[in-house]
Amino acid sequence: MLPSNFRCCGLYSPHSRSESDADDNGGRASQRPRTHTGATPGTAPEAAESTESVDGAAGGHGAASSDPEPAAAGQADAVVDDGRTTPVQDHAGFLEKVRMSGSPTRVYGNRVSTSFHFANYRGGAPCLVDKSLVCKGFWDVEDIAIRICLPRRSGKTYNLTQLLLFFSMSPELNRLASVPNSVLSSSGLDESAVFKMSVADLCRKKREFLFKDSLLQTLHPEFFEQHFMKYPVIHITLKGCRGTTYVGFLKRLCESFANAARQWLKDNMVTEASVSDTARDSLARLKKTLEHCDTIRHMDESRLSGQDGLAQTLFEDLSELVYDQFGQYILLVDEYDMPFIDIRLANWSEADKQAARATLESLFQSMDNLYMRKSLLIGVFEVQMAGMGSGANSIVDIRLIPTLEKDIRNSITRASVPHSRGGMDALTDAFWFNEAEVELLVVSSIGQYLHTAEDKAVVLRTIREWYDGYCIGRFRGKYIPWSVISYVQDLRSILNDCTPSRSAQGMLVDGATLAADANLAATNYWVSTGTTRLIDAYIKQYPVPIIRLMTRLIYEFEAHIRRPAELQDLADMDDASDLRVLLVSTALDVTEHFGREFAEAKFLSLCLYGGYLTRRAINTVCIPNREVFTVWRELFGHATVGENTTSQLRTVRRGILLEELWAGKTDLLHELIRSSHSALAGHNHFKERDYADHASSLLLAAAAFGALTYPDSYAVSMADVTLTREAPAGSGRCDCLLRLYSTRGKANEFGVIIEFKLIPMSMRDDIKRNLGGDASDEDINIAFNRRCTEFATSGLNQITDKDYATVLNAGCLERMHIGMAIGNNAVCTATKLFRRQNASNAEWTVVDKLK
């Protein structure tokens, strides 16, 4: 076993995070201050170098040890392959929980932290999840060129680093800086021997230490011995290639490859004296190209031209040198898609963008050569590249979405279902957390607070509701590592903060209190680590169809979480539901421009790759969990009422708009509608139905943020408000029907009937023309407002004349008619309130207010 103060067998550890104020449970974060032990409140954990990492977490249906405290030294249990969770104790008394059947799972330590990373030493007993089987999975996949595209914080960069430290024959000294020499002394080497070691030997010992007793070494010792530190590896990251101009982009791109080449030369101590005869010419060419890169790095961008192929030349020279010196190499490329996305969003000419894309395609084509043994490209989006995969090697994509119905039906969700412990299963299971890992993490980290099986179930249910729902390969039920570890960390702080006062009163954490604490810790973690800029760009370009699509997604999610838990599995999804969102294609080109018409499949694919949607069945997508639901609610608010109004809605008093309607007022409704339809006001081609749809969406946004919730209600849901739109037009029904709660209680209905009338875009100009050139602005405004009132009144009268109120339920005791004139940057309403004493055909009476 490892020494007591360190363990790192494949744990991701998300970076430092910022606190999110988003709250899906109606402001519960204000119920009690969030306190964090061991750190100043409000400060983020220390950030690490890696842009992707994962901390340990667990979740599953197999049994787990409920004993949170370590046994006495020397009382270790044996590791058995019987499906149980087995606590194994190292010589220092720290528990290591292992489950060897099903998906092999190992969690070590008992203190979660978002600042731990692979090969990132901090001391203590961090709670880590072993992901080392990714190495065998990568090697076992027969395809030479592999591409994995997953959302951020799913463990991509972490696993790429783990592959580098396992396979690379180079010392990789710069990646071991945080591992002190003292760990080798604690492993049995005396200090003098460590001090006399060469750099290569010292790095090798540290890397052996990092993989000691890992699942990879335990389950596959022959593979470990055969492949550990045996291959040349070229590692390139393309994250920092953004430039304000095309020439600036080329400079950043060349710097990325030049840095990789310099690092490789330094790590392998390749010089003219040490290089083999066959590689001497290759080294000379590479050094000459690097000298040229140094020259242009200090040149003004205006003086640079003809450097389009320099990055490609750098890679080809490095590739040839590595092959000539050591043979076929492994190529690891991190964030390969970032340059393509930066080009798509750059404010360049179309000619420059086309030239940049051509440069990248040629570069990736040069990577596809016979010098390469295996390669792995990591990113978020599947960029269509004409070069890579069309030459010597065909590229295989490992997706977060199963492509066949049988993969959906046979997908792995529980630890009781074994996989091969190698090959594609081991590779794909290394990303995100599975249920077994989440469960073991919870037991390891906060087991001392969980006194019964139901206590643990409460925490696991909360984690599942908020952070579960993703797929990769044939695995589903995957959890967001960053969110899970952040949640467990915060919950541990909350429980630790409260326990002393409860203990002083002779109290234990009871089930109700634990449930409240579990809900309190649940908030947005992953979503606060990135932006939705590509999705925002789509919404800005196609607001109306995307608002309709978001409405369906939100309603479907709310309907899904109201199903019994046993019916929420993906395979049990009712594909005949009217709320389902179909995905007819997963093709996506993030480099292409927006078309004239909204392409729903492309937008859904964008959201799918970004982690904002997941696959529920073979041809349907959905919101994966409650954390991501809060993002869609926010986007929905931005699209309908704007960012400022959304911020206001987020803080409004519960039921404020409902109370205003009860009082027969529409002031707040006016304000919200103006914000809502301003996005459409400048488009003359929009029709009355577009404005009506937009205004209806506004009401749903208000409901989503609680403005139409019953004042005394705790829960907030868009589904609490039933909104019906006329479909098709001219069908003899009202434009919009809202079914809200009555002043007499939730058992009774308050119906709101709205009839929209479009204010023509030309009406103000027509009035000005009719009044003559001498008309003042005041006269024009008076005439315009009078005309808007006439439109609104005609809508109000239409509700009565066509007897739209007959659609209201028998239990409706109160109703409101609203004629709404909308358009031309104006909103005008005419209203009437009605009440009856009972539902048995009592007469309706006009009243001034209901409450």
Image (spheres, rainbow, N blue to C red):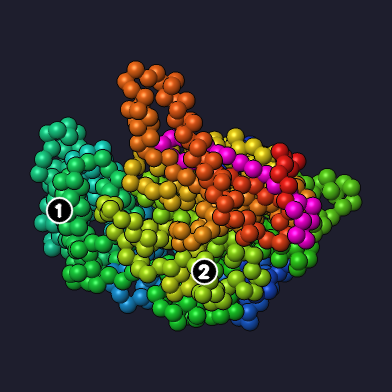
Q: Residue at x 89, y 47 (%)?
A: 505
Residue that appears at 60% across and 34% down = 667
Q: Which residue is mark 2?
A: 578
The kind of residue tagged 1 is Thr
**Which residue is at 42% across, 48% downward?**
688
Q: Secondary structure at mark 2?
A: loop
Q: Please tell me which residue is depicted at 41% across the width and 21% down the height of the picture.
A: 777
Looking at the image, can residue 3 be seen? no
Q: Earlier in the sequence, mark 2 or mark 1?
A: 1
41 and 72: which is toward the camera: 41
**Mark 1: few, some, or many residues within 10 Å (few <14, many ≥20)?**
some
Name the spot of residue 462 as percent of width and height, x first.
66, 60
Amino acid type of the residue that numbered disc 2 sits on in the rendered structure: Asp
Residue 729 drawn at (x, y percent):
45, 58
**Apparent side of residue 627 relative to residue 686 in the rendered image (left or right):** right
Image position of 274 (left or right of 748):
left
Q: Which residues are magenta?
A: 820-843
How many discs appear? 2
Q: Is residue 341 magenta?
A: no
What is the C-alpha distance between the residues marked 2 and 1? 55 Å
Mark carried by residue 313:
1
Is 824 within the magenta? yes
Q: Residue 443: percent from the left, percent from the top?
A: 68, 63
* 833 shown above or below 282: above
Q: Is residue 132 left or right of residue 722?
A: left
